[in-house]
Structures are given as C-alpha cells and as structure tokens.
Amino acid sequence: MTVRLLTNIGRMWTGNDVISNAALLVHNDRIAWVGRAADLPQSVPGVVDDIVDVDQVENLSGALVTPGLIDAHTHPVYAGNRYAEMAMRSSGSSSSAINAAGGGIGSTVTVTRGTDPWTLCNGVRERLRSWLLSGTTTVEAKTGYHLTRDGELADVRLLRELEKEPMMPRVHVTFLAAHVVPPEYFGRQRDYVEAVGAWCADAAAAGADSVDVYCDEGHFTTEESRWVLASGRNVGLLPRVHAGAFSRRGAVQLAAELGCASADLLHHTSDEDIAVLSRYGVPAVLCPATAMQRGSLPPVRRMISQGVTIALGSDHNPGHCGITSMSLVISLAVAAFGMSVGDALRAATLGGATVLGAPDRGVLAPGRLADIVQWDADHEGAFAWSFGLKPRRVWRGGIPVQ
Ligand SMILES: N=CN[C@@H](CCC(=O)O)C(=O)O
C-alpha cells in the first residue's frame, strides 16, 4: 500500500473551497482525504487503516496548493517555427499578406510533412514536458499539421505514446484534420471534407478522444463542419469546434445542435450566441493570448453572468503563441478578460475537466486523481500578480515529477 500525506499546507484551493492549514492524504494515484490538518483522521475506511503507516510525509507549510492545471486547447504537434511571420504581423501585415508571402498554417504543414518522425517526436516531447513542469498536469493536444490520413493518424499515436512516458502530462488527443484544406485538395474542398469524415473512425481506433473542426472564414463552412463533427461523433469522438475566431458564421449554433463538448476561441460572439451556449450547456474554451493578439476579446463577463462554463487554453501553436504555462494564461485571463482569480483558476482546472469529459480531475477531493501543484506563493492572488507563477512541486497521480 502506498500512501502519501501532504500536511501543514498553508492554503489549499480545492476547486470548491479554500482551506487554510490544510492536509491531504494520497493513496496510490488518488486523493483519499482532504481537510483541515487539525481534523486529519487516524484512518480512512477501505483505504488506510492507520495513517501512522504512511510511507511518505511532505510538509508544504506556507504554500498554496491547487489541483494540477488543465490546458484545454493546444496545437503542439508541429515542426519548425514562424517567427518571421510574427514579426510581419507585429508590423501590421494582415493574415492574407502573410499567407501570400508563404506563411500561415500551410507553411507549418510543409515543414512538418518534411520532418522525420524522430525529430518531430522530440519536439513534441519537449513541449509536453514543459507544460508539466509549469504545473499543467493535463493537456488537450490537437493534430492538424500533416493533413494526410497517415500523417494525422501518426500524430494521434505519437501523442498517445508520449503520454505513457515518465515526466509527461496526461494528454487528451484531438483529431484536427479539418484545420485547413491542404494544397493537394485546393479546388476540391468537399472531397477533403468527405475524406476527413471517413478518417474519423481510424482516428478513434488510433486513440483520439475528440474531433475538432476550424469553422470560420478561410477554413470550413458550417455545412462542412457539420459533416466532419457528425462523422466523428458517430464513431465515439467528442465533437469540439473552433468558433468565432475571425467571424460569426453559425459555429456556435452548430455546437449546440451537435452537443459539442466545447466551442473554442469565440472572439466574435453576440448576445444571441451566449444565450445559445448557456441554454444548450456548451462550454466555452477561451484563449486569452490569441484573443489579445487578434485584438478582439470575447465577452467573458457576460458569458460568466449567463452561466456558461468556461475553460482556458494556451492555444499554443507555431503561428501565434508559444505559451506552455497555464499559470501565465490565468494571469492573462485576469488582466485581459477581467476574470476574477477564482474564476480563472476554476476555468483552468474544473472548467478544463468538464470540457475534456474528465470528472476524475480538476478538483482536490477524495477519489479524484492526485494531480497536485504546490506553488511558489501563499495565496492564489499571486496568479494575477506574477504573469507566470512557478510551481515548487508537481505531482501527477501522486508521483512527484519535480
Ligand atoms: N487555434 C487554432 N489555430 C490557430 C492557428 C494555428 C497556426 O497558425 O498554426 C489559430 O488560427 O488561432
């Protein structure tokens, strides 16, 4: 029996509550007991007969402890970089000018297709590790830079394999072959959409959890998105959709119609869209770094007041954003979206668990996974102040990874 006791925790943000002078008991990979240190029981029925037997006690006195953070939107499977494009954008170049100069998602597709699997794998491994070391114990990771059947399936398998290695976060794999239309299908967009729909069954068999479509100007229409998402849903993938990044074109309504697990980005969102998200219980995944870069912020406070479930994502991708720190994303959500620290932390834990369909995490409570972070601060307000609060210790399933 492996039991760990983390005791004398200065302040524990559980996801439901803040407990001062807390203690936490971990059995194998799960949390066995949570509460005030003064109330620590002598035994937990069915788990530990006598806590005197615990094999390890950690003293976290004076520190803030939270559930492991969850990044609900990332694109980590790529090779190369697009720094020159970032410089162009910073000087005022439009997306179409960048695409005309050979940039954009298509340029990453070319480089990724030309990169050997070993090099690609090393890059993805390094990125995933960096999430874990900065306190993110679960990462949603999309494919989408191969855009061939075999390449996309290899990306799914790569993510599934990497997750099994030591020092890796848990990974929720999303099949995003419908990112953009690849060059060999130019002029035959409908054929590509039908091909992606047919690949969904293979993606599910390869281990994907979700299917995603970029439903927006310059990407896929609502009709095309419906085809892909319904195909994925039919084979057991959770549907999710890039909605309202550049324009409003019915993606939110589509998400409601199909019962999507999330509608993501939502920079352009009307009151009517918010009412739909709220009425049909579609959670919103919001990515403050991307919204700031696009100069178009989603109406987050109105979403919260209408009861929309919010999750946060870094939107790490080669074209816009290299962030792998969800504590930085929390800081940005507070500063740019006007979220309270509590709401932002909840979105980066429980919100993420909700959109990923993972009720076993995102909160420190008995029976949940022992994914735990001790932060280099004694109060959660430090997230708003630090712009990248660092963890002191991170545990994944009760195992210290740092
Ligand atoms: N969030 C999704 N995809 C990114 C683009 C990724 C890229 O440029 O490589 C976006 O358009 O926000």
Image (cartoon, rainbow, N blue to C red):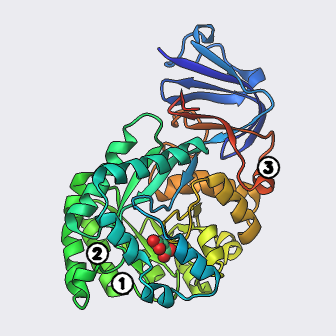
Amino acid tagged 1: Phe
* Residue 260 spot, x, y in % from top left: 41, 69
Looking at marks 2 and 1 on the same chain, the residue that comes earlier in the sequence is marked by: 1
Query: Dot 3 corresponds to which residue?
Result: 382
Label 2–label 1 contact, CB within 8 A: yes
Label 2 neighbourhood size at 10 Å, few (<14), some (14-19), many (20+)? many
Write down the quadrant of residue 240 in the picture: bottom left
Q: Is residue 344 left or right of residue 223?
A: right
Query: Dot 1 corresponds to which residue?
Result: 220
SS of the residue at dot 3?
A: helix
Q: Is the residue at mark 1 in contact range of ligand 1, meaning its CB lies under 8 Å from it?
A: no
Query: Dot 2 corresponds to which residue?
Result: 228
| Towards the viewer: 153 or 337 | 153
Q: Residue 231, relative to residue 42: is it above or below?
A: below
Question: Can residue 35 be seen at all in this image of the molecule?
Answer: yes
Q: Is residue 11 left or right of residue 297?
A: right
* Residue 131 spot, x, y in % from top left: 54, 48
Q: Residue 236, relative to residue 46: is it above or below?
A: below
Label 1 neighbourhood size at 10 Å, few (<14), some (14-19), many (20+)? many
Amino acid tagged 3: Ala
In three-dimensional space, the C-alpha distance between marks 2 and 1, rounded to whole angstroms, equals 10 Å
